[in-house]
Image: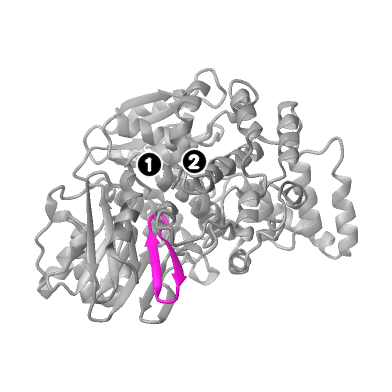
């Protein structure tokens, strides 16, 4: 795991500035490659994971010097790929996956990406073809941002802060992206809050050659009904899931540095730890605890650690800890997010314990239908059919009846569904909304009072309409919430501590396996995440399988009203983003939250605070 940056049409010094802004991602080494005649510069900050010797330094060129690469991530099947390439005459001088990528590109061309199993953001410069190729992994685990400040000029990097450090991009907000953030708690890709900066979509190649630019998708999760398994029995499918998951975990344990796992005591992280323990050796596990809080999962995590004999570390987090690390957390934020602080703390604990790599159970809820929405939303769709036949004015009036002194967030979302929902995708996006239209219009100023429903979101809704309800929700979760919130925050907050987080539950082989399974097999009354539990039959203890789902979150609702309230008062007293947000409405919302109003959740307050913190760093000078 590293940080990459590069330019087309600029001098070397600019890339040196960019990789300086990414120092936290790669404290072990840095390098720059410059093709002055072509005006192409690649930069790299290295976090050494495989082959720790100087031979693994990047940017790296192939034996001919025609192809150069700067790469962030891990290709877990690089040894298998290397073995396939050697009979074709390729010789390797390092033990890195980077060198294998160079050979794979030379051998397969752009199709090399189809042979990769892992997480990656790749920049390849092909001198003979006079072409820059940017590649992002299938699920979007590793980020890659880019901008085109002027014709013939390109910038790209692992984080937005590196692009802004160049001074080539005006610090100007994108109104639609800001509206998207206050709708969903993160900016829907491929947009970013900064106008002119985009993120490369997952499973996509971007080629730049002369004046020509081409975006080419190479993979997408396909839940089509015509791909569903029909001949195999459930027992055969469960065996495939277990075999694929155990292989995914085994591959992600390949490292030349200390490795551990995040453990909450839930099904997903416990499944990962169970598979790790079967590989031999004592696993190191890390858990955040909240002493005295209903959110504390320590007893469950402790039980899993005992069963699998892990070397277990618990990190108690209190409001005082949040206050003491708030400045460092603020500096780590590359994009505003209503989530992420939990990953910041557990990543810090793992790094302080000497870990360089940690495995996570991220993705289990999205892939194995673990969230409540998988059970709640599909039955609602038929109930909306009569409402869709009514005139819009009648639907809107019915929705307004749900507002009043008794209003709550749940009632507001039901009202929004009655007024506007036309499909399961609409129900999904309403369910994932933090600020519904009415409140969002009150909190935002012009020109930010625009629709958050970008063409990309509408396209997700269109694609999902071809899948069964359960599969449609999995698809939307993978391409919306997991992509824009969970994966983005995990990369940002873990790399703030130079920690590489690996996510075996969204290995693309496992995703393809689950996508081909009939939806009816995925949700059952016998256990949550039915297929995952049954595939690991005998490995997971019943008290973990059947305990209520809690989610990896902090007890913010209590803390914000209590010990952290003075800190929030201080931030709002010096509110900097008043040109974007109505400060009076924000303060009124804060006071209503403290008074216990049912329609003001802690997530709404934290969404505002996270934006304010990010805004200060980007627009008030601290990030420059």
User: Is label 2 in a helix, a strand or a loop?
Assistant: loop
Q: Which residue is mark 2?
A: 340
44, 352: nearer the viewer: 44
**Residue 34 appears at what percent x and percent y?**
23, 67
Q: In this orientation, does residue 525 appear? A: no
Q: Is residue 385 left or right of residue 177?
A: right
**Residue 238 appears at what percent x and percent y?**
41, 52
**Residue 10 appears at what percent x and percent y?**
33, 68
Note whether 390 is above or below 245 in the view shown.
Answer: below
Q: Please tell me which residue is depicted at 70% across the width and 53% down the height of the picture.
A: 379
606, 11: nearer the viewer: 11
User: Is label 1 in a helix, a strand or a loop?
Assistant: loop
Q: Which residue is mark 1?
A: 496
State yes or no: residue 190 in magenta. no
Residue 225's disc number: none
Please rate how many residues cluster around mark 1, counting C-alpha atoms within 10 Å: few if below 14, some from 14 to 19, many from 20: many
Q: Please report the bounds of the magenta region as a residue range.
A: 140-158
**Residue 289 appears at what percent x and percent y?**
46, 25
Note whether 55 is above or below 101 in the view shown.
Answer: above
The quarter of the displayed image where residue 577 is located: top right
226, 296: nearer the viewer: 296
State yes or no: residue 149 in magenta. yes
Observer-side mark, 1 or 2, equals 1
Q: Is residue 246 left or right of residue 264?
A: left
Q: Please tell me which residue is depicted at 89% across the width and 65% down the height of the picture.
A: 391
């Amino acid at each position: 795991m590293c940080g990459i940056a590069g330019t087309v049409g600029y001098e070397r010094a600019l890339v040196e500035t960019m990789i300086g802004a990414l120092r936290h991602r790669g404290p072990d080494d840095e390098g720059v490659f410059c093709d002055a005649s072509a005006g192409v510069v690649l930069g790299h900050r290295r976090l050494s994971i495989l082959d720790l010797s100087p031979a693994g330094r990047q940017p790296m060129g192939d034996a001919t010097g025609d192809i150069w690469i700067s790469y962030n991530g891990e290709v877990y099947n690089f040894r298998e790929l290397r073995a396939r390439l050697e009979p074709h005459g390729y010789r390797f001088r390092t033990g890195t996956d980077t060198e294998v990528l160079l050979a794979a590109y030379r051998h397969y061309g752009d199709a090399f990406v189809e042979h990769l199993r892992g997480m990656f953001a790749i920049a390849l410069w092909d001198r003979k073809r006079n072409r820059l190729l940017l590649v992002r992994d299938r699920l979007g685990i590793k980020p890659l941002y880019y901008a085109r400040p002027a014709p013939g000029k390109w910038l790209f990097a692992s984080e937005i802060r590196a692009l802004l450090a160049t001074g080539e991009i005006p610090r100007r907000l994108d109104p639609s992206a800001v509206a998207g953030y206050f709708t969903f708690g993160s900016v829907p890709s491929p947009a970013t809050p900064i106008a002119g900066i985009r993120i490369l979509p997952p499973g996509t190649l971007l080629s730049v050659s002369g004046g020509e630019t081409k975006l080419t998708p190479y993979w997408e999760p396909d839940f089509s009904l015509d791909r569903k398994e029909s001949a195999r029995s459930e027992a055969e499918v469960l065996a495939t899931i277990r075999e694929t998951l155990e292989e995914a975990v085994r591959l992600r344990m390949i490292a030349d540095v200390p490795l551990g796992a995040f453990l909450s005591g839930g099904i997903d992280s416990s499944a990962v730890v169970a598979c790790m323990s079967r590989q031999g050796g004592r696993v190191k596990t890390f858990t955040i605890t909240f002493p005295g809080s209903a959110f504390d999962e320590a007893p469950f995590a402790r039980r899993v650690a005992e069963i699998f004999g892990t070397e277990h570390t618990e990190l108690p987090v209190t409001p005082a800890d949040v206050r003491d690390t708030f400045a460092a957390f603020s500096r780590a934020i590359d994009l505003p997010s209503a989530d992420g602080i939990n990953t910041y703390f557990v990543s810090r604990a793992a790094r302080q314990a000497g870990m360089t790599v940690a495995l996570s159970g991220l993705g289990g809820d999205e892939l194995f239908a673990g969230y409540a929405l998988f059970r709640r939303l599909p039955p609602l769709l038929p109930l909306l059919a009569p409402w869709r036949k009514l005139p819009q004015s009648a639907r809107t009036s019915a929705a307004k009846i749900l507002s009043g002194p008794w209003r709550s967030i749940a009632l507001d979302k039901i009202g929004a569904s009655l007024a506007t929902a036309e499909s399961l995708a609409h129900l999904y996006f309403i369910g994932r909304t933090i600020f519904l239209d009415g409140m969002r219009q009150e909190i935002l100023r012009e020109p930010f009072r625009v629709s958050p429903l970008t063409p990309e979101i509408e396209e997700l809704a269109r694609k999902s309409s071809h899948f069964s309800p359960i599969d449609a929700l999995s698809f939307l979760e993978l391409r919306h919430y997991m992509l824009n919130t969970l994966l983005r925050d995990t990369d940002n907050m873990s790399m703030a501590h130079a920690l590489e987080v690996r996510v075996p539950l969204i290995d693309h082989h496992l995703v393809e396996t689950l996508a081909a399974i009939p939806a009816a097999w995925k949700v059952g009354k016998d256990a949550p995440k039915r297929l995952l539990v049954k595939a690991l039959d005998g490995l997971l203890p019943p008290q973990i399988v059947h305990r209520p789902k809690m989610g990896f979150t902090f007890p913010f609702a209590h803390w914000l009203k209590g010990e952290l309230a003075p800190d929030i008062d201080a931030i709002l007293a010096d509110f900097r983003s008043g040109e974007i947000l109505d400060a009076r409405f924000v303060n009124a919302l804060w006071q209503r939250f403290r008074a216990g109003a049912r329609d003001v959740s802690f997530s709404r307050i934290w969404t505002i605070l996270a934006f304010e913190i990010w805004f200060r760093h980007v627009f008030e000078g601290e990030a420059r």
